[in-house]
Image (tube, helix red, strand yellow):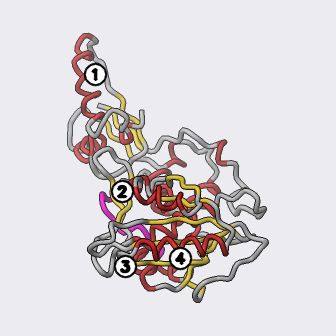
């Protein structure tokens, strides 16, 4: 079950488990192996069997969307999922395999461009709760030290402040971060888990609580949902725009989604990472009450959907 998503035991867990299972079938004449899974990237045992399956005698290969496999799933729910995240819905409900590497926002460039409505910093509002994130660099090469502040409004989440530094004067960076956090009433910042050591210690020394942020795949998936639903406001900051536009998405050998940016002058993602992380935590603010556009359908009622079936 869910062969495309075997990743607990390692990159080749699907092949290892199948190779261990195969000899045990020999003691049962006429034994058959049933492989059922939602598709992932075009790699691994499921993709290999699927791509060969229609040509191998004695093997039944079926590719079918959710509505064919389980007609009880409402079409209105599937339509909303396609609107929320077309690429994920194509895999989850359309039984389509994903490309190994793609531009993360490639299918919603126009909607992403429409998010850049803000001009510069948004002043502090005492009625808002603000969240901050840092994407630190080694202060060398093309990397920059980026900082962002965001909050969740009644309808949309917005990035209020974006800063980048390419100076090696760490004290100057920390002083500005300290001032901005004081202005916006921020006591906690989220940082990359690889930023332990001096970054964490330095931030704690200026009175900030530090936590490690979620994986970029989770953060960017949340950001993309906000983009697709028109619920994100961003400052028209060239480095931020370029970073988001150049965001790459790929699936590793274990079929887990990864997010990254090319390390060049146009494509570095320091500001994008900082903003998307701040936006992620702001969007989770449960003290803000608004209407979720997807509340009409209870997603918890529709689980365990099977999209692709291979038998041989």
Of the image marks 4 and 1, the number of the one nearer the N terminus: 1
Q: Would you say residue 66 is visible in this rendering?
A: yes
Q: Would you say residue 83 is visible in this rendering?
A: no
Residue annotated with mark 4: 176
- At 33% from the left and 76% from the top, the residue drawn is 267
Q: Nearer the viewer, mark 2 or mark 3?
A: 3
Residue 259 appears in which quarter of the rendering? bottom left
Residue annotated with mark 2: 98
Which SS class for mark 2? loop
Q: Nearer the viewer, mark 4 or mark 2?
A: 4
Which SS class for mark 1? helix
Q: Position of residue 79 (x, y in %)?
A: 59, 60
The answer to whether residue 106 is magenta is yes
Of the image marks 3 and 1, the number of the one nearer the N terminus: 1
Residue lying farthest to the top in this orientation: 27
Of the image marks 2 and 1, the number of the one nearer the N terminus: 1
Q: Which residues are magenta?
A: 98-108
């Amino acid at each position: 079950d869910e062969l495309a998503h075997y990743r607990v035991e390692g990159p080749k867990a699907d092949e290892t488990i199948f190779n261990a299972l195969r000899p045990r079938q020999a003691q049962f004449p006429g034994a058959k192996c049933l492989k059922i899974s939602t598709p992932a990237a075009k790699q691994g045992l499921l993709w290999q069997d699927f791509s060969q399956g229609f040509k191998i005698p004695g093997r039944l290969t079926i590719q079918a969307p959710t509505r064919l496999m389980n007609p009880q799933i409402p079409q209105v729910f599937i339509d909303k999922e396609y609107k929320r995240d077309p690429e994920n819905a194509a895999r989850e409900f359309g039984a389509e395999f994903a490309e190994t590497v793609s531009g993360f926002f490639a299918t919603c460039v126009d909607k992403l461009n429409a998010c850049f409505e803000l001009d510069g910093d948004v002043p502090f509002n005492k009625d808002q709760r603000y969240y901050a994130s840092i994407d630190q660099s080694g202060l060398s090469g093309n990397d920059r030290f980026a900082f962002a502040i965001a909050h969740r409004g009644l309808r949309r989440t917005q990035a209020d402040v974006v800063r980048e530094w390419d100076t090696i004067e760490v004290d100057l960076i920390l002083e500005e971060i300290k001032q901005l956090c004081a202005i916006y009433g921020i006591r906690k910042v989220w940082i990359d888990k690889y930023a332990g050591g001096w970054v964490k210690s330095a931030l704690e020394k200026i009175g900030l609580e530090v936590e490690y942020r979620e994986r970029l795949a989770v953060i960017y998936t949340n950001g993309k949902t906000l983009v697709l639903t028109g619920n994100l406001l961003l400052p028209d900051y060239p480095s931020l725009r370029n970073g988001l536009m150049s965001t790459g998405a790929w699936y590793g050998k274990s079929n887990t989604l990864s997010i990254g940016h090319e390390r060049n002058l146009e494509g570095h993602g320091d500001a994008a990472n900082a903003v998307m992380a701040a936006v992620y935590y702001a969007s989770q603010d449960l003290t803000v009450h608004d209407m979720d556009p997807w509340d009409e359908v209870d997603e918890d009622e529709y689980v365990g959907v099977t999209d692709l079936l291979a038998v041989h």
